[in-house]
Amino acid sequence: MSKSLLVLGGSGSLGSEIVRFFKSNGWKTISVDFRKSDIAEISLTITSSNEDQMKSIENELTSQNIKVDALVCAAGGWTGGDSNSDGYLDSVKKMIDMNLYSAFGAAFLGAKLLKPNGLIVLTGSLASIKPTSFMIAYGATKAATHHIVKSLAQPDSGLPANSTAVCILPQTLDTPANRSAMAGANFNDWTPLTEVAEKLYEWSEKVDTRPTSGSLIGFETKNKSTTWAPICLFK
Amino acid sequence: MSKSLLVLGGSGSLGSEIVRFFKSNGWKTISVDFRKSDIAEISLTITSSNEDQMKSIENELTSQNIKVDALVCAAGGWTGGDSNSDGYLDSVKKMIDMNLYSAFGAAFLGAKLLKPNGLIVLTGSLASIKPTSFMIAYGATKAATHHIVKSLAQPDSGLPANSTAVCILPQTLDTPANRSAMAGANFNDWTPLTEVAEKLYEWSEKVDTRPTSGSLIGFETKNKSTTWAPICLFK
């Protein structure tokens, strides 16, 4: 029986690349996103990552007897601005809705739908292990995401037995949105989405390659070469 | 002219004690809370800490030409539960609404209403500098709050010139709610609210007693003796 992957945010730039990569390697793929996925075998659409929507996903997949081997939260977004910026409070709501509800929602889906020995991956931010006054809401929601993963790694976290929870902390992903927002940047210093998909696939397929549960794995690309390294947040 | 204090959550257990303490020392006090304050000179009621409500507070106080010397966010709440608990997603929403929107809202009010050389204090959580699987939503929203304070301490944070941003990280506060929830506990190990109010008053009155901006100041009480110490979160 093929293994299965659920991607929250499976229709976004990163999410659809992850879906594509796993599918091309024979995995059954499930996308949960605002938009339908043309790639995933099962595509479920939602209107938010809030309680009723997450429960409807749980109910739908449970009714189909589907459990997953890996679950990735690739949903999220970015807004900048400090505490005095125009639109600051709107940015707060956006970041909470896009980054934090999706991270908490992925944890819920992980608790309900992961098989034992499963992998759950949330998306944090390498910049957010430091203060981020110029993108205060983004940074704080990502700091919260890092904390969620730390909590999920505890033995009594609610995840199934022997789950591994990992947070990936990108520096800058090479997405179409970033290319159009920062057209003058050096794209050789951005991480190709395929490299992220490959890494998640490796961790999903080969249990012994997985980072210790609770790890925050930062990655940065310089001159087309990507370095992955665990980040120590708590002493 | 007397100095003035704004407390977001000024009608709660901690907030009302802070209002009382500052008022008894001659400060003008402003409470912003769901419930009216019987103590504060100005009591503004809100229905949430979301954008429209925070902007209405800004507009109301600006129309009265009020700026404040100190601003404390004493709003917040607690819910327990791991990622598989009944009511987990409801707890997520509660913690985001109670703890995170209030912290972000306080940052907004600080940017708009603090005088230069002002003090802004948010309320974090000592337990949340570690993973908190048994109260995953609470811990993550408090981790986000710690991050907000770190960002507010940067020079380009949007706060007025020479502001000091501090996060207080209580272990357990001696509140009526905690006494009824944990009736068998040793109350000698809980921090009296007056001690918190005294400390905030000292920092507000005497600039040279303030912690470095961006400090996370943890405190714990053992045998009626409270120890205050900065917590190092980032390396």
Image (spheres, coloured by chain):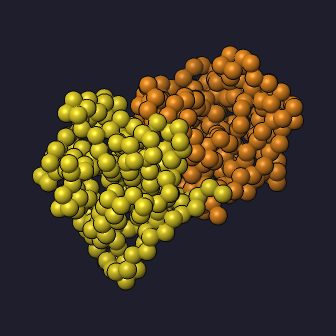
Chain colours: A yellow, B orange
Q: Nearer the viewer, residue A199 or B138?
A: A199
Residue A188 screen position, x and y as percent: 33, 80
Residue drawn where x is 34% and y is 80% of the image: A224
Note whether A126 is above or below B80 in the view shown: below
Looking at the image, the residue that sits furthest to the front is A1
B25 sits to left or right of A152: right
* Residue A30 at least partly seen: yes
- Dividing the image into 4 quarters, which one contains the N terminus of chain B? top right
- The quarter of the picture where residue A180 lies is bottom left
Note whether B192 is above or below A191 in the view shown: above
B29 sits to left or right of A99: right
Note whether A31 is above or below B47 in the view shown: below
Residue drawn where x is 87% and y is 31% of the image: B224
Number of callouts: 0
- The quarter of the picture where residue B176 lies is top right
Residue drawn where x is 39% and y is 75% of the image: A226
Residue B126 screen position, x and y as percent: 68, 42
Residue B23 screen position, x and y as percent: 77, 28
A62 sits to left or right of B220: left
Residue drawn where x is 32% and y is 38% of the image: A113
Q: Nearer the viewer, residue A81 or A6?
A: A6
Q: Nearer the viewer, residue A80 or A7?
A: A7
Looking at the image, the residue that sits furthest to the left is A38
* Residue A94 at least partly seen: no
- Dividing the image into 4 quarters, which one contains the C terminus of chain B? bottom right
Residue A10 screen position, x and y as percent: 24, 51
